[in-house]
Image: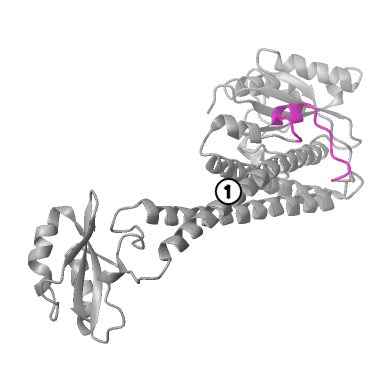
Amino acid sequence: MSKNTARFLLVSLPASISHTNSHDEALTALRSAVTTDYGTVFPFSIPEFKIGTLDALVQQADELAKLEAGCEAVVGKVGDSLKTILEGDEGKIAQQKTVNDKPAEQYLKSFHWNKIKYRADKPLGELVDTLQKEITSIDNQVKDKYNAYNQVKTNLTTLQRKQTGNLSNKSLSNVVPPSLIIQESDYLETHLIAVPKTITKDFLKTYETLTPMVVPRSAVQVAADDEFTLYAVTTFKKHSHEFIHKCRESKWTPRDFKYKEGGNEEEKKELDKVGKEEKKVWGEALRLGRTAWGESVMAWVHVLALRVFVETVLRYGLPLNFVCGLVRTTPKLAKKARSSLDVSYSYLGGNAFGRDKKGRVTKDDSSTSADMQAAGHMGDSGDYSPYVCYEFEIL
């Protein structure tokens, strides 16, 4: 992981942390709690949504937790697809990872709820359903396109190997003269055998007695490369299957070949056609990957915003009066930022939680953790925090 990787904390606090219940003063208090030593705080605007029953909110909290994990997984899979298609070139990959044509971090710092795509006047359940369908669609589209690209790439690699491989696997259309192949005979058949150069003497000594009815002294050297020598051998058809089987047992490679007029030219045309198709699908996969990465990140951040809102209602109650801030920190400093927030806002946990000698909420109060988990008040790590906080990275 890069040392410059950013880690983000999405924190929601009641406006009452300031004496005047002012959002601006509450955000200033949050900045003071984090301090510039541990991170930078940016305002994160979340609209007010239609709130249903308490039972519905608890259920939505659970659904959003699963959906957020799904969004993160899709972002990761799209990133892996970009890595594959760009052959691990980190510079080129970074160029493709944008959200609305700007870096993801810039998008986060200037986040505004997309009210056109996700209407804030819709019930929470509808918004969750819309985001679920969107992330599933993105996942399926990327999967289908990259499967298509991998299939074309595999076909191209196979054709290229036929042109550039050794005599045990390459195309023989421009290697074997048609005069060597017995055609239209009811009794005789020509077999092409690729023999490793290290055992050609053994082949020449034993091929005639390998099976019955091998035509004596019929072995003709057709071609040779650095690894194999290709021979043509004639047998009676009734023993062809047995001869091929015995060749494989002797570690000689029988080649399946039927002479076809103009076969070499056809193969070159096919290679050219598949090569062009591979470039076309590569471009389509790259464009889709760039778009899908940005759209999946946007969906993920909107899901995070919904998680914060739902938990804020469950945690702080009504009427709503809260401030949300995005803390930009690093993996190394994230724990210190959380500890600093714990010191400043542990009192928000009330008397329902155990405290240490310094009055801070303890993280392992088993008497209430199960109930808090069921109510959606536990963090993703399973630890209780007296304030709403979600921690994430966009890689």
Q: Residue 100, located in which quarter of the rendered image? A: top right
- Residue at the farthest bottom position: 186
In the image, what residue occupies the spot 54% across and 57% down? 273
Residue range of the region highlighted in magenta in the rendering: 100-117
* Amino acid on which the number 1 mark rests in the picture: Lys
Q: Position of residue 93 (x, y in %)?
A: 59, 34
Q: Which residue is mark 1?
A: 279
Q: Is residue 116 magenta?
A: yes
Q: Observer-nearest residue: 179 or 119?
A: 179
Q: Position of residue 366 (x, y in %)?
A: 61, 38
Q: Is residue 18 visible?
A: no
- Residue at the farthest front position: 179
Direction from residue 213 to residue 159 in the image, left or right: right
Direction from residue 48 to residue 98 in the image, left or right: left
Q: Position of residue 379 (x, y in %)?
A: 66, 36
Q: Is 30 located above or below residue 227 in the figure?
A: above
Most frequent secondary structure within the magenta stretch: loop
Direction from residue 370 to residue 197 in the image, left or right: left
Q: How is the image coloured?
A: one colour
In the image, what residue occupies the spot 45% across and 53% down? 157
In the image, what residue occupies the spot 82% across and 34% down? 316
In the image, what residue occupies the spot 73% across and 30% down? 102
